[in-house]
Image (cartoon, rainbow, N blue to C red):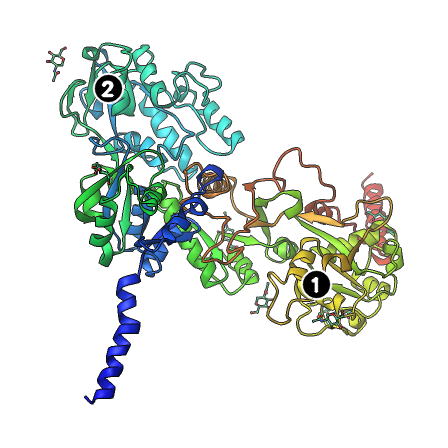
């Protein structure tokens, strides 16, 4: 090596390699929660200090952090044990360096036990038949996932798999047949009507409650202490409860003593019993603490940093880091040595097995149809997250090329559920014999509201002035297309028959992307160009001056002007929303033509009522776990959030909640729902049809006459 070369190498090392070693910071993946828990803006800037060895990477949700760690875009983050189960199922490798404990000496967040009254003579799980069961109930799924709250019954009650019943009803019926009575207060399923039906059908599972008729979250015997009160009030024989609550309830630790422990025992999973005050009580299942998990290669260094943190530290970046890691005041416990997920759960009795109870055979897996790799990937995360929280039936993700193909897949029974945008709903109903399972509801300003738009300065005073105007439609057979037809019909501007031809005559040279290219309809496709497809394409057609009026969704104007969601076919326009004006149909109508929810999940129209119930319940439960009203401090997985920074993947970001009706609230009164418009489509009574009907009537009369 000559001198220059050596010098070059030295320089190279100095400039590129050294900084890489000395200044590469460890990346903490931070997830912001709801209002009070938006910590990134407050604490992350402190980590920019020169002496800090950590920096923030802000993620969408905790599953996003798992992905980033896996892709080496982040080094560590805080996770719940449920997150770790998902990671393990997805074969993502992380190492656990620290536990976030509320109490230093407690090995687990909580342990769950079965307490029996000695009078009841329960010595093993075989003695449970015809006993009275106090259950903490439902409606606090983040604290007690369904898996933990159902664990006792899942381990002791023989499962039922009647194909004529929903999965939930099978489970309810199995318990109902084993126990004489129970108090299982709170929502059994998310749909209030179904919940009431089930509770009426299996009343013995509410009979122990203080108010059996309501059997609600307000019940005296609902919740962590409720199930113990139910036992010690003498209502029940056995209670499923947290060990720490049991100890407090029976005065074994500080706190009011509700009853004497010597009258009660613990029923153990190995079919033995032991005294309540045992020093080594038998537990059925434990909930491990939340943890800090890291990339495999950086575990030791990160653990060292975290272990050096302490609340009285004066260094601002270190205390900020501690605030970013903690949710409330917790002790950060070091795990020595660092552990894999498998070995961490190995100590956590029951926790992993709780996640692998086998369902009924044949499985009732719900196959969701997706239309891109991105959608399919988001769907896969939804599937794993659902499994971890005990959502049944389980989900699967099937990829097709586009929504039309998804609808076809439903029709031929290759998939079960597809999310269909408003423009394709009519085709779904008509061509693929589908029906709606649920809607993605939204606030009024986010709804799909179809309107007629013109450029400022064009004088159109209502739809009657649109005769001869050059029109731009988003798509043939879409919401705006059908809504325009209905509106013109209601105004008496076109007739009820041969509507395509009627529109071709009503408008001047226009573009309706996708319309059959018949000669008689030439007027409706002759101005079409590349890039005129869809709402944004229609606005492009309008703004380029080729059209006078565009029939689109109201929100697309904002998207068009801002260039967001713009197709790469055309660059962002230099217009503002003020350059567009909405034309109202007439003074006697609302200014829009129709409105639709953001999207709707469609299923085969021959789907059974039973299947619809089961499947709807799954999605409503997913909504409560991963929708806008999640109850964790930070979101685990946002089904209505961006995925890998892309908007509207699988579901719409603006979705408020999923409902079996199109409105977000029952009080929602917005006029002209699109579905109703489709249902009320006028029938064409053409001359020939009337003739046939007349002939039929004559023949019927004749038959009647002859039969006398
Ligand atoms: C449990 O309670 C019984 C009866 O009160 C008592 O005899 C026994 O010593 C207690 N055991 C422990 C471990 O405290
Ligand atoms: C926390 O840090 C302060 C100052 O750096 C130190 O005096 C104290 O001993 C530390 N406490 C613990 C528990 O490590
Ligand atoms: C889906 O693709 C097919 C052709 O493969 C096409 O005919 C259809 O219009 C497409 N549907 C949508 C919604 O883009
Ligand atoms: C519904 O139709 C699909 C395909 O057309 C068929 O495979 C399926 O068995 C039908 N389901 C019921 C419940 O009739
Ligand atoms: C237009 O074309 C479709 C098929 O492409 C045909 O069914 C229909 O009858 C045609 N309509 C007219 C008016 O020619
Ligand atoms: C921007 O506006 C000017 C007139 O204000 C117009 O001439 C030009 O074509 C517009 N550019 C685009 C990209 O629309
Ligand atoms: C069109 O249909 C509407 C509603 O079905 C009806 O009231 C109206 O009389 C019909 N008009 C014609 C011309 O048939």
Q: Is residue 356 visible?
A: no
Residue 428 image position (x, y, % from top left): 61, 55
Mark 1 or mark 2, earlier in chain: 2
For the residues marked 1 and 2, what is the alpha-carbon distance in whole angstroms? 68 Å
- 493 vs 35, left or right, is right
Quadrant containing the C terminus is top right
Closer-to-camera residue (181/553)? 553
Residue 158 image position (x, y, % from top left): 28, 32
Quadrant in the rendering for residue 116: top left
> Is the residue indicated by label 2 positioned so its CB lies within 8 Å of ligand 1?
no
Q: Secondary structure at mark 2?
A: helix
Residue 337's mark? Answer: none
Exactly how many numbered labels are in the figure?
2
Mark 2 is surrounded, within 10 Å at the Cα level, by few (under 14), some (14 to 19) or many (20 or more) other residues, namely some
Residue 247's mark? Answer: 2
- 485 vs 477, left or right, is right
Is residue 480 placed above or below 84 in the rendered structure? below
Q: What residue would you read off at disc 1? A: 476
Residue 484 image position (x, y, % from top left): 77, 55
Is residue 267 placed above or below 43 in the rendered structure? above
Is residue 440 placed above or below 484 in the rendered structure? above
Quadrant containing the N terminus is bottom left
């Amino acid at each position: 090596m000559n001198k220059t070369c050596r010098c070059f190498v030295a320089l190279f090392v100095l400039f590129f390699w050294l900084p890489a070693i000395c200044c590469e910071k460890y990346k903490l993946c931070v997830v912001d929660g709801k209002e009070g828990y938006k910590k990134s803006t407050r604490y992350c800037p402190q980590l920019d200090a020169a002496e800090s060895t950590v920096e923030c990477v802000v993620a969408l949700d905790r599953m996003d952090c798992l992905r980033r760690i896996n892709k080496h875009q982040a080094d560590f983050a805080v996770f719940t044990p449920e997150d770790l189960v998902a990671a393990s199922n997805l074969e993502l490798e992380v190492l656990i360096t620290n536990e976030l404990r509320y109490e230093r000496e407690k090995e687990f967040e909580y342990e769950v036990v079965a307490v029996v009254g000695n009078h009841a003579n329960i010595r093993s799980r075989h003695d449970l038949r015809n006993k009275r069961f106090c259950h903490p109930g439902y409606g606090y799924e983040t604290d007690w996932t369904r898996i933990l709250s159902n664990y006792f019954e899942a381990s002791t009650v023989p499962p039922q798999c009647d194909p004529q019943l929903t999965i939930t009803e099978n489970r309810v019926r199995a318990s109902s047949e084993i126990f004489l009575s129970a108090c299982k207060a709170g929502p059994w399923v998310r749909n209030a009507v179904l919940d009431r039906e089930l509770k009426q059908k299996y009343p013995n599972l509410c009979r122990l409650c203080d108010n059996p008729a309501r059997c609600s979250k307000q019940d005296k015997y609902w919740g962590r202490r409720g199930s113990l009160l139910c036992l010690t009030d003498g209502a029940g024989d056995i209670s499923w409860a947290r060990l720490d609550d049991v100890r407090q309830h029976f005065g074994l630790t500080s706190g009011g003593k509700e009853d004497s422990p010597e009258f009660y025992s613990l029923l153990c999973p190995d079919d033995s019993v032991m005294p309540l005050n045992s020093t080594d009580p038998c537990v059925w299942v434990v909930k491990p603490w939340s943890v800090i998990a890291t990339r495999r290669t950086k575990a030791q260094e990160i653990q060292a940093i975290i272990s050096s943190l302490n609340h009285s530290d004066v260094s601002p970046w270190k205390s900020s880091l501690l605030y970013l890691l903690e949710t409330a005041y917790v002790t950060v416990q070091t795990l020595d040595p660092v552990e894999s997920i498998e070995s961490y759960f190995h100590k956590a009795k029951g926790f992993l097995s709780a996640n692998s109870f086998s369902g009924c055979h044949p499985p009732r897996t719900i196959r969701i149809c997706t239309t891109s790799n991105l959608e399919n990937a988001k769907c896969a995360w939804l599937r794993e997250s659902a499994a971890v929280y005990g959502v049944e039936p389980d989900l699967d993700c099937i990829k097709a090329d586009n929504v039309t193909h998804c609808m076809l897949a439903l029709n031929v029974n290759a998939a079960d559920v597809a999310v269909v945008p408003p423009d394709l709903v009519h085709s779904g109903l008509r061509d693929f014999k589908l029906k709606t399972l649920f809607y993605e509801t939204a606030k009024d300003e986010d709804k799909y509201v179809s309107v007629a738009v013109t450029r400022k300065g064009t004088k159109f005073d209502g739809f009657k002035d649109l005769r001869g105007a050059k029109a731009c439609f988003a798509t043939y057979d879409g919401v705006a297309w059908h809504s325009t037809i209905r509106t013109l019909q209601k105004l008496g501007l076109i007739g009820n028959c041969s509507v395509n031809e009627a529109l071709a005559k009503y408008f001047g040279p226009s573009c309706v992307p996708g319309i059959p290219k018949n000669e008689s309809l030439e007027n409706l496709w002759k101005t079409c160009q590349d890039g005129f497809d869809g709402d944004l394409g229609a606005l492009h057609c309008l703004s380029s001056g080729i059209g006078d009026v565009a029939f689109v969704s109201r929100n697309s104007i904002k998207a068009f002007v801002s260039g967001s969601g713009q197709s790469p076919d055309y660059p962002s326009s230099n217009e503002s929303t003020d350059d567009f004006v909405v034309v109202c149909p007439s003074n006697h109508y609302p200014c829009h033509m129709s409105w639709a929810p953001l999207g709707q999940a469609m299923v085969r129209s021959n789907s059974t009522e039973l299947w619809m119930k089961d499947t709807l319940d799954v999605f409503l439960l997913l909504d409560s776990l991963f929708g806008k009203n999640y109850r964790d401090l930070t979101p685990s997985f946002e089904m209505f959030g961006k995925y890998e920074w892309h908007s509207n993947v699988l579901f719409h970001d603006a979705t408020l909640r999923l409902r079996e009706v199109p409105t977000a609230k029952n009080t929602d009164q917005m006029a002209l729902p699109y579905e109703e418009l489709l249902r009320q489509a006028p029938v064409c009574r053409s001359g020939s049809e009337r003739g046939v009907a007349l002939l039929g009537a004559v023949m019927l009369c004749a038959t009647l006459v002859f039969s006398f």
